Amino acid sequence: MNKLNEYDIQFLVKTLQKGEPIPADYKYKLFPTKQKEYELVYAGKMRKEDILANEDGVFPVPLQVEKVFNGEEYPAGDKDWRNMIVFGDNLQFLKTVCENKDPLIKDKVKGKVKLIYIDPPFGTGDEYDGGNGRSAYSAKRKGADFVEFLRRRLILAREILADDGSIFIRLDYHFGYYIKMAMDEIFDRCNFRNEIVINRFKRQLRDLNQFNHATDCIFFYSNSGNVLFNEIFRSRICSFCGQKAEPQWLPMSSPGLRNPPERTILEKVLLPPRGRHWTFSQEKINKMAEDGRIRIENNDSWTDLASNKHKGVPEYLQTEETPVDSNWTDVKGYVRSARYPTENPEELLERVILSASRPNDLVLDFFAGSGTTPAVAEKLGRRWIACDIGKLSFYTMQKRILTIQNSKDLEKPKKKYGKKARSFVTVNTGLYDLQKVFKLKNDDYIKFVMNLFEVEPVNKKIGGIKIDGQKKDGYYAVIYPYWEFKKASVDEEYLEDLHSNIGKRVGGRLYIIAPANYVDFISDYHEIDKTKYYFLKVPYQIIKELHKVQFKKFRQPQSKKNVNDLDDAIGFHFIRQPDVESKIVKKSGNMEIHITKFLSNYLEEETGSELKNFESLAMALIDNDYNDREFVMDEFYFAEDLLPKKKKTEKEDEQNEDEIKEDLKRLDRLVIPLNKEDCGDKIMVVYVDIYGNEFKEVLSVKK
């Protein structure tokens, strides 16, 4: 601590006694920084130690396999590994990986990820063009909130990278250099490798007081000095205009002196010109001569180091390809024709993945969006994990991997890739299918619910009662073995019996984990002789007393412009299927789906009121030719897309979610158009509510 004089001490004492704030200039006197030479300071910044200790209120949660695709057998050479599409909050997922306990990923991911690529929404509140002058989406987190949102995830990302691993993060001009400073702190400035310049959507707006923005950047960091890096080559381009350039013949000397100075060039020993040296080593010159890339140009004369005069300057021919530098404007920045906003092109990800990984290395993208990273990783023979919080992203990626054989080949873009994807799984984190939980074997159920409620296993008995675990607050937990009883439940008689054996020996509190329908109490705990028995119910009744941060469901967007909104999920939830009534109606030689009922089994979080019909609908996803095995999305409609067409005013073009809900509540039906020619014998529709719950139905189509 910097030394405080007597005046400072008396001033601080009086200030504290009055309950007044301490002036900001005392901050570093009282709490001198232990950072390096600079630090990014902003409101809401948490200590790294607190983030890793889950003091931010976000905890690891179990991973629940939803489905295995493309065969039950593990891929050849990948024993006990399948690639993963993960639905859920990436912060929860990263914490689960860091914890390294979940059996699906234990000792398979943490410390083994060779490459992370992320393209997070830029968090500026800006609207991004979706064509015809309409906005495609807006990323609404701002300022310090966005920086901290991303920083927390980057801290965890470094924890799971391999020692020789790398991370590439795409950013725009709004917050790029704030994140650069945060990454210098997290990854260490000496591990900064490149700022790579790439294209963004080109705008030609006029009457501005600045230039139109034409580029984004990618910050490339390694996890240590021991970095895996593969040199990448491309066709020669002009250094100034970026256009393709033909190889040129150039003089073979460079400024400065080297020893030894002489080289054998076309079987003749030559000293270099005065004040210069031959550009290449003898070995390189020999190889270039073999390839016909050296000549003597006879028009110019020059004097060598020994004052000998020569006619004809030695020249070399540039190669057809050159190493890729940090200017990547030779590839597309985004796929403009893509239906998913801000889809990264495969050419961009191919360059990233080839430069920082080898075949069978593990690649991770936790802002996966449309799934370009896993698609390219699959084609290049890498293992991969893709995570996103959006249902549209989840099903877009699922389709992209399931139909990858029909996509373009990376080496021959005019041809199809032609190979099915290796076996992969879809995984839920933080939002679970309750039926699958109760179908787990007894030991697997115990492990799942203990991870869910953050209970560390212990092996002990108190008063003859088996204690299953201990929570972080030091109190014990028992798991009610519901499978042993058909009618018995956690009732007052059960608690009295439990209390008579262990009541005074558990420190005033005991947790009981049980299915909700086995718990006879409406309250969250029952007290006997100053011992509180807390019920951790499956599905969970939120107990505010036990959590620093209130549980919060993450929301699905109701319009395209909000598809990339950033959100956090706190805690976990179980799927509650919406109530849906719909039917196919023939109309004018075509077909429509008429939806007359869509109700979610939740109260509105902000108001506590019941949700009205259609109010909670987020989107409808359609497989036009369902094959009875897997859902492959062909079409999707946001709730906003299903509103009746009307003349739009400027204000209506910018409808927010509340306005969309109000419009939805006024309707008695929603209509989804179908093209009969595109439909097979069956179609499958997945309705998604704003909380991520799904209702799936298969409809028969009679042509």
Image (tube, rainbow, N blue to C red):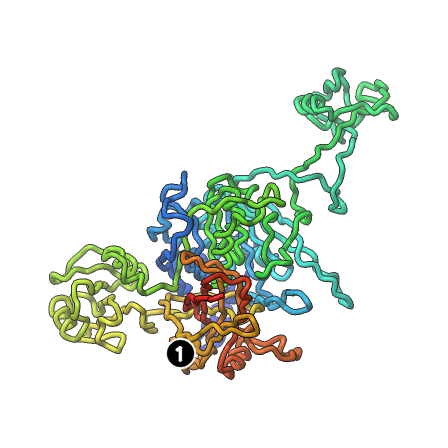
User: Percent position (x, y) of residue 609?
Assistant: 41, 83
Q: In this view of the protein, can residue 28 be seen by the observer? A: no
User: Percent position (x, y) of residue 32?
Assistant: 50, 59
The three-letter code of the residue at mark 1 reads: Leu
Q: Residue at x 73, y 61 (%)?
A: 212
User: For residue 276, what is the image quadrant?
Assistant: top right
Query: Position of 394 compared to 286: left or right?
Result: left
Label 1 Cα neighbours within 10 Å, binned few <14 / some 14-19 / many ≥20: few
User: For residue 643, what is the image quadrant?
Assistant: bottom right
Q: Residue at x 56, y 53 (%)?
A: 169
SS under mark 1: loop
Q: Nearer the viewer, residue 486 or 683?
A: 683
Query: Position of 334 compared to 77: left or right?
Result: right
User: Percent position (x, y) of residue 400?
Assistant: 51, 54
Q: Give the residue number, with chain letter if any, for mark 1.
A: 603
User: Percent position (x, y) of residue 614?
Assistant: 47, 78
Q: Nearer the viewer, residue 252 or 696?
A: 696
Q: In this view of the protein, can residue 577 be seen by the observer? A: yes
Query: Position of 100 compared to 15: left or right?
Result: left
